[in-house]
Structure formats: structure tokens, C-alpha cells
Amino acid sequence: MLTLKKISPKELHERMQGEEKVLLLDVRVEEKYNEYHIEDSQVLCLNIPKTVIFNLEERDELAQITKEQPIVVTCTTGNSATKCADILDGLGYQVEVLEGGLTAWNEYRK
């Protein structure tokens, strides 16, 4: 198993200051996502619950995402995101995990 790339809240924030849009995949359940998620003009945030990702088969693809674009996967603490990123990485997606998840993000943004 390859070591997944991680991105710190600080690095994510810096990337959001750049020209390119950041694709963020939030794998929490919809209710939690609707309560709060990272919003920014430079962020395209998608909510695909982890249960969907856990059930992906080898040949499956996510319609909303191309394999060319880097994806930052996040959840509440980073655990589910890591599992999901692992699966997506295996399917050929370019993934990074937001270190510490939204908990760390909110700490950093205080």
C-alpha cells in the first residue's frame, strides 16, 4: 500500500489562495455535510458519503470526478477520508487527505 498524500489545513488554505479551483470531496453523511462544509469561491465541494465509496467496485467510476484532477478528501477527523482516499487511489484517482479533517481545519481557521 502506498502512503497517501496528506495536505495540512495550512496548505489547503494556501492552495485556495491560488488561481486553480480546489476539488474537495467530503465523505461525511449528508446531514453533517449540510450542517457545515468548507465553502470558498475557489472550492468545488462535493458530498459523496463514504458508504458509497466503500461500495465502489474495481471498474466503477464517480461521475462527478475525472481522474485527471487532484481531489482533496475530507471528513470530520480524517479517518474515513483516509479509507476513502485509499479506495479512490486504487481506482486511479489523484487523491490527497486533509490532515485532521474538518476538526483540524476549523482549529486552523480560528
Image (spheres, helix red, strand yellow):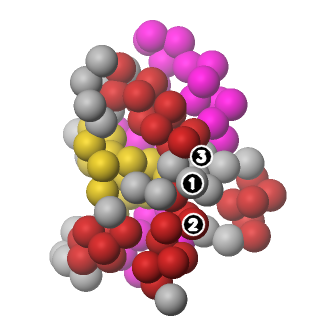
What kind of residue is marked 1? Thr
Contact? badges 1 and 3 (CB < 8 Å): no
Which residue is labeled 3 in the image? 27
Q: Main secondary structure of the magenta part?
A: loop
Q: Which label's residue is closer to the chain start, 1 or 3?
A: 3
Q: Which label's residue is closer to the chain start, 2 or 3?
A: 3
Residue 52 rendering spot, x and y as whole percentages? 65, 30
Is the residue 67 above or below the residue 78 in the image? above
Closer to the camera in the image, 82 or 52: 82
Residue 5 rendering spot, x and y as whole percentages? 26, 43
Q: Looking at the rendering, which quadrant does residue 103 occupy?
A: bottom right
In magenta stretch: residue 66: yes
- Callout 3: helix, strand or loop? loop
Q: Tell me where the magenta segment starts and ends, as one range.
A: 38-67
Q: Looking at the rendering, which quadrant does residue 53 occupy?
A: top right
Which residue is labeled 2 in the image? 103
In the image, farthest residue toward the bottom: 110
Residue 74 rendering spot, x and y as whole percentages? 50, 53
Q: Tell whether 31 sits left or right of 68.
A: right
Which residue is labeled 1 in the image? 77
Number of other residues with Cα within 10 Å of mark 2, as a class: few under 14, some 14 to 19, many 20 or more:
some
Q: Which label's residue is closer to the chain start, 1 or 2?
A: 1
Number of other residues with Cα within 10 Å of mark 3, as a class: few under 14, some 14 to 19, many 20 or more:
many
